Amino acid sequence: MDKVIVISAGLIIGSFLNNIISYLCSFSRFDLTRSTCLCGEKRLGFPELLPLISYLILKGKCRACSRKIPFRYFLVEIISFLLVYECYIRIDGRFYFLIYALLTLSLLVIGIVDYYKLIIPNSLVLLIAAIAVYKIVFENDFSLAVLYPSLFMISFFSLFNLIYSKTKGQRAIGFGDIKLLSSLGLFFSPAISLLGVWLSSFIAIPGFYLIKALNKRQNKSDYKVPYGFFISLTFILIVFFQDGMSNYFKLLFKEL
């Protein structure tokens, strides 16, 4: 029964996240009342609000105006369900399940918004920072060491930006990316935080060219890297595999 509740909650949350993503990307206004069709002409009925099922029944088109519903709606609902369910299965303790589920869902929204708009909403960065502080308070870990990753992220990337701007005339990494990394550094251990920076940078290089090739906009010469998308993807994976990663690096450093 618990799994049914978790699955249902994940799907419902995914539907709600689509509303938030559309608002943050300025695709639509934020509305807590019953959703409308993309054309805004028709209030959606109960069958049309069912996560996943409604998309399949409607064959990806609005019943009122036949406008195509972006596949992103369907995809976000599936990913949200998987994130919540995986957090429930893999993470022990109700408290940790809730904060890790909230963290991964926040990263999902950040990644998609950055992919579309190349912006990282400050509200979601502050939410992740608040989750990290709540975790620190719960674990009663008030040592200065918890601040080291965040301070390192801010100092290193600010200095890197300064040097890069002096030589190239532009920033190497956006301030939104720095704020996101610093908030994640507050949540994760120093080793995991640095690993996340390295992995996100590593996958961003081929990922950038892949996204650029798939992007349908005609003017691709000034296309920028949605680094927040890769940061979000990397740290979502780290949530589920950080124990194995930590053990691997411990063994690696022992051998060295």
Image (spheres, rainbow, N blue to C red):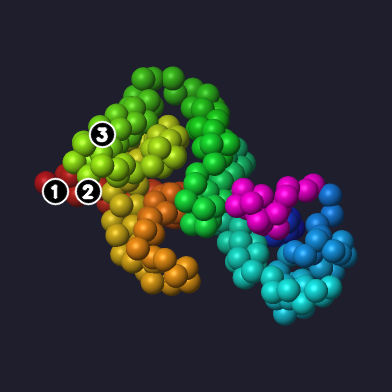
**Distance between the Cα atoms at labels 1 and 3?**
37 Å
Up-down: is 70 above or below 254?
below
Q: Is residue 207 visible?
A: no
- The residue to which callout 2 is attached is 251
**Residue at screen point 80% across, 74% down:** 65
- The residue to which callout 3 is attached is 162
> Judging from the image, what secondary structure is the residue with disc 1 in?
helix
Is mark 2 in CB contact (under 8 Å) with mark 1? yes
Q: Residues within 10 Å of mark 3 (few under 14, many from 20)?
A: some
Residue 255 disc label: 1
Residue 177 disc label: none
Q: Is residue 255 left or right of residue 226?
A: left
> Judging from the image, what secondary structure is the residue with disc 3 in?
helix
Q: What's the residue type where badge 3 is placed?
A: Leu
Whole-percent x and y of residue 40? 80, 61
**Residue at screen point 78% across, 48% down:** 31
Q: Magenta part of the protein: which range?
A: 13-32
Whole-percent x and y of residue 56? 72, 77
**Residue at screen point 42% across, 32% down:** 186
Whole-percent x and y of residue 100? 54, 44
**Distance between the Cα atoms at labels 2 and 1?**
6 Å
Q: Residue 188 versus residue 166: which sits nearer the camera?
A: 166
> Judging from the image, what secondary structure is the residue with disc 2 in?
helix
Is mark 1 in CB contact (under 8 Å) with mark 3? no
